Amino acid sequence: MHPAALIPTPDPLQVPWGWFQFLLLFTFFLHMVAMNIMIGSGVITFVKQLSNPMANEALCHDLSNQLTHAIAFTVNFGVAPLLFLQVLYGQFIYTSSIIMGAYWLSVVFLLIAAYGLAYLHKFRFTAWSAGQRRWFLGASLLCMFTVGFFFTNNVTLMQTPAAWLAYFRHPGGLFLNLAEPTLVARYLHFLVAAVATGGLFLAASAHLQQRLPAQERQARIKNGLTWFTYATMVEIGIGIVFLLSLPKPILHRFVGGDWLATSLFIGALIGSFYCIKFGNRERLWPATAALATTILLMVLVRDLARQAYLAPYFHPAELPVAPQYSPMLLFLLILILGLGIVAYMLRLGWQSTKEVQQ
Ligand code: HEM
């Protein structure tokens, strides 16, 4: 059977595909930033609780407080790109989700477990010893890693319909895309990027916490930037392995075969070198700007790679449009309102933290 025969017929769009594409990329960028902070600060807290819990007690307590917020942002900023992904690539993501259905459904329970364990870790922080706490944080992180792994499985499976034929050998929803050559490098690429971002988050939040004694504050900034710089160096190595594991026609697009793909990819590489340079020189805000630019460019690169994978079957520009603009306008209005409310809530939260500190 030809894999194209397994692709369902897509529904028409209400507005041209570019709108959904922009919203998918924008909200996915927010999801990635929150996910990176969540996993990165979780991993750093865990390592510190393993290596020298007494010396890092206050730092781990602060990070444990921030972790639950990061989970909430990751999940909420994940819902939006999931909706836009379904609008643009529904016939692919629904099919791959069904093929790995048992694992896919387990994401909900894993998220609840990750959230619950992180809350226990936070609320019982002072009551428990570091030895007890690390089990809860470790288990919470394990759930998060598993969710990320299932996402990488699904995202790679949706863009390789040839792999869907496995359904006939595993019709019970217990299939993972383990034969995918990019899977491990791709997954590690996300995890190590998260550790780098977690380091930068640690430095930035210490910088903003005026109540910290100057020496402690400085030590946290330095330590966070060290995590950031070294993890970014490792990330470049993993990125090369990831790049080389791509199918040759797709790899070719990023190394001169397609000017847009090549320019974005080179831009992202330059961004990572600036991350290392600014991280190494302990220049916090330039490093933050370099990281934000790099993540944005990588999000674009990743999307072009997906389009290249699906090129033999489909491009979202081919989707028929049955114009209906009013729902989109209402959505945009609510999105702007929602983001405004989130910004307002963050401001209130920040002010109340400052009042508690004074
Ligand atoms: C512990 C929580 C989570 C982690 C660690 C996580 C991690 C990831 C990672 C690593 C990817 C990239 C996969 C790849 O390209 O190989 C991803 C993609 C994605 N995530 Fe999450 N995620 C989490 C929760 C969620 C939730 C709750 C949602 C939605 C309800 C969500 C929505 C998405 C979507 C839609 C994509 C793919 C976007 C695209 O391909 O354009 N995520 N996530």
Image (cartoon, rainbow, N blue to C red):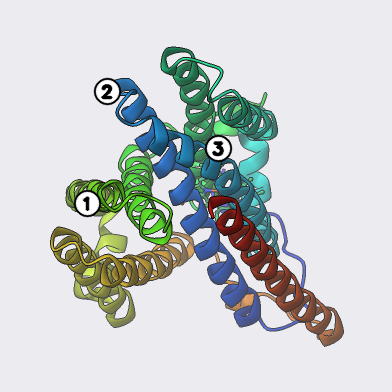
Which quarter of the image is occupied by the C terminus?
bottom right
Q: Residues within 10 Å of mark 2 (few under 14, many from 20)?
A: few
Q: Name the residue that disc number 2 marks.
A: 51
Nearest to the observer: residue 13 or residue 355? 355
Q: Quadrant of residue 31?
A: bottom right
Vertical comparison of 47 with 301: above or below: above
Q: Quadrant of residue 98?
A: top right
Percent across and percent down for residue 188 are 33, 40
Percent across and percent down for residue 23 are 62, 73
- Tell me the kind of residue under disc 1: Lys
Q: Left or right: 356 with respect to 159?
A: right
Q: Residue furthest front?
A: 358
| Mark 2 → mark 1, Cα distance in angstroms | 18 Å
- Tell me the kind of residue under disc 3: Leu
Q: Name the residue that disc number 1 marks.
A: 222
Q: Residue at x 38, y 41 (%)?
A: 187
Q: Name the residue that disc number 3 marks.
A: 165
Secondary element type, mark 2: helix
